Structure formats: C-alpha cells, structure tokens
Image (cartoon, helix red, strand yellow):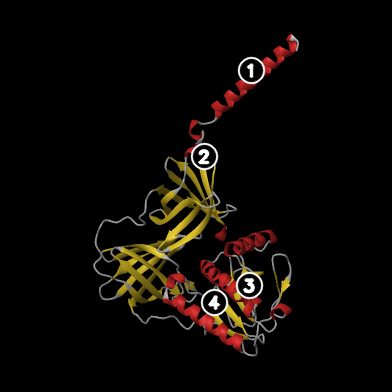
Amino acid sequence: MNIKSLLFLLFASVLSQNLQAQTQKKQPAQYANLKSTFVPNGTWRGTFKIKPDVEVPFNFEINAKNTGKAHLTFLNAEERFDGGIVNQTTDSIFIKLDQFDNELAFKIEGDSLVGVLRKQDQSGKPLTVVASRGTNYRFKTTGKAPTADFSGTYDVAFKSPNGKDENAVGLFKQNGNKITGTFLRVTGDSRYLEGIIEGNDFYLSSFIGSSPSYYKGTFSTDGTIKGEAVSARGNIEFSGNQNQNAALPDAYKLTFLKEGYKTLDFSFPDVNGKKISLSDEKFKNKVVILTITGTWCPNCVDEASFIAPWYKENRNRGVEVIAIHYERQLDSAYVKKALTRFREKFDIQYDQVIAGKPDKQLVAESLPALNNFLSFPTTIIINKKGEVAQIHTGYSGPATGKYYTDFVKEFNAEINSLLEQ
C-alpha cells in the first residue's frame, strides 16, 4: 500500500469516529440504554381521569410468559384477564388491547407510567391514565370500618333519561372493608367489580381494556342501597332493596319469532367472503347454536370463553355454532383483523360471519323473523329440523356465580334434549 492510500484510510477512520461521537452526544442521556435498564415487571395501580374531579382506579401486573415476552394482565376481584403483549421502546410502553381495538400508551417517568387510553387508530378522545408500581390496593382507604356486612342480593333500578327505570340485580360479597360484586341487567352483567366499603359508603371499579367502570353509593342498615354509575358520558343513578329472591325477567321470553315464522333465514359472509346460511349442507340434521355477538362487547367475551371450549368438546355429538358478528367498522381489512384476533384469542373453531353494525334496529332488520332485538349477546338454539327451539337474551357471565352456573346447566339440558329427539 502506498503512502497516499494509507493517509486516505487514516482520514476515513478518524472521520467515522467523529461522526459516531457526535451522534452519541445528540442522544439525550435519559434515553441511553433505558430499554435495558427499565424492567416493567411487577404489580401496578393505575388511575383514569374520566372527569376533572373523578379518578377510576384499576390494577394490573406485567410478567414475562413462557414466550419470553412481557404480558399485561388486568386484575379484577378473582379474575385475571390477559391484556396483551407489552411493547417497550427507549422511553415508552405500548399495550395493544386488541380485544377492544384500544391501546394503552405510556411514557416512562422514573418508576411511574404516564399516558393515555386511546383507540388504536387514535380516533376519538383519549383518557388520561397514570400508574405506579408496587401498589396492591385499589381504592385508598381512610381506615374507617364498615358499619355492617352488606353482602347479599339486591333488587336494583337504574334511572333512565326517558323516565323508564331499568331493572337489575345487585350481587355483593363483603370481607372486612373489601367488597366485590356485579350488576345483572337484561342486557348482561357488569362483570367483575372490586372495591371498598368505608362506613356505609362503597366504591367499585373494573377495567379489562374497553372503558373503565365505576360505581359508588351507600348501603343502609335497613337493607336499602342507592348510588350512581359514573362515566365520562354522565352519571346514572340507581336505588334498591336487599332481596335474596331478586330476579330479572325470564331471559327466554324476551326475544321471540314473529307470528308465522319457525326459523331464521340469512346468508352472511365470513371474512373470506364465503356466504354461510342455515340451509347449508353442513348444518342439516344438526342442532345449531347461533350467537349474536361482537368483538367489542365485554359480555360477548364471556360468552365466547364458554362457547369456544364447549364446542370443541361437543362438536362430534352433532352440534354446530355460527357466530353472527355486528362490528363497529365494516371495511374488509378491519373486519378480518377483528374477527381473526377474536378467533385466535378464544381458539374459536366454529363459523364466524359478519352481518352489519351493532345497532339494535339494524340487527332486527337483518334478521327480520325476530320480534325485536335487545342485547349483545343473544343466543338462539336451532333444532335438527332447522326450527328455533330457544332464544336467550343477554348473558350472565362467571362473575354472577349461581346465575352463571344455572345458565350453563339449562343450556346443556336443552342441547341434550334436542340431540335426543
């Protein structure tokens, strides 16, 4: 190598080192190696700011699973709900809550997280959320002891803006100043609520990735209850009385076929455009379960977590399932993404079709044999002749205890009876 070439290589090496040093100087010190030094694993307490003076607490944990990827799990009473994979950058953490097309986006600030709950396409108004690590409580307590044990079943009425109250059943379990519970309505239950009692006052909340739920109110020693469901859209008052025999209207008598109809006639496409109908050869001489559902619906999540494994255990007995989806967006890319994620999450092995948007009037129009439509989900059971045998409005999930086990028992009894015919 001649002297001229040697000098050129030396100059190039020095220039490269200078550029690298300048690049490193431009990188803020707080970002350097942050991804490798900040480990989000552990228990967390978050709070949503749903109004200027209202914060809704929730709990979650982050742990690495067998895959080596960190997952977020929401904690509500005895439920552990998988929120999704935690994606970390140098200064931020993102959790795509695919079940509800939402996302938690956090900036790392010391050992805290500060950010928002937003739609994945960033439409709409985000909710501010902050979280701190190592905190196991949900609501802060002053230490004031409950005046009594208010566990039990309550007849409850939620006030409606149109003046017509909505009947509900309140279920509560108290252990010291801790309380868990849920509200059953015709349209479904409030899932797992968790909170505290101080004196006569109670506070309950829940969050699994959709919108935060928050209830507050007062129990009285005379067996009455009053309070309000609080949200960013407004507050809904409720009141009621303790009644161990409290019950909703019969869920099997709320939705039925119009006079002159014996079955449902539809032809809806799956995500690949293939039309599926009850008249298809696949469903002939079989008991068919139709579930009117949506990936956005928390009670539909509970139903899918029951129906999906039930179908795998019973499909060889001569039963089929069709999930009729009504989704918030109908463009093919979105529908395919939403239904595929739903399918993978619950290992769904039955047919899914897309029928329209989740408007109750539109649902009734798309299934004109129904007298009306009241609730997502609604479950329709078809006998071997292709006729409607039973329609169940709403869904009472695992959080409702006996109501859930009663539903499962009745569901299996009906299927067994139809299979024997």
Q: Which is more foreground, mark 3 or mark 4?
A: 3
C-alpha span from label 2 to label 3: 43 Å
N-term mark: 2 or 3 = 2
Say what secondary structure mark 4 lies in. loop
Say what secondary structure mark 3 lies in. strand
- The answer to whether the residue labelled 4 contacts the one labelled 2, judged by CB atoms less than 8 Å apart, is no
- Quarter of the image holding residue 22? top right
C-alpha span from label 1 to label 2: 30 Å
C-alpha span from label 3 to label 1: 66 Å
Q: Position of residue 70 (x, y in %)?
A: 51, 49
Q: Which residue is mark 2?
A: 35
N-term mark: 4 or 2 = 2
| Amino acid type of the residue that numbered disc 3 sits on in the rendered structure | Ile
- Quarter of the image holding residue 153? bottom left
Report whether 406 appears left or right of 280.
Answer: left
Q: Which residue is mark 1?
A: 14
* Residue count near mark 1 (Cα–Cα under 10 Å), binned few <14, some 14–19, many ≥20: few
C-alpha span from label 4 to label 1: 74 Å
Q: Which is more foreground, mark 4 or mark 2?
A: 2
N-term mark: 3 or 4 = 3
Q: Position of residue 23 (x, y in %)?
A: 58, 27
| Amino acid type of the residue that numbered disc 2 sits on in the rendered structure | Lys
Q: Is residue 379 above or below residue 27?
A: below
N-term mark: 1 or 2 = 1
Q: Quadrant of the C terminus?
A: bottom right
Q: Which is more foreground, mark 3 or mark 1?
A: 1
Front residue of 194 and 78? 78
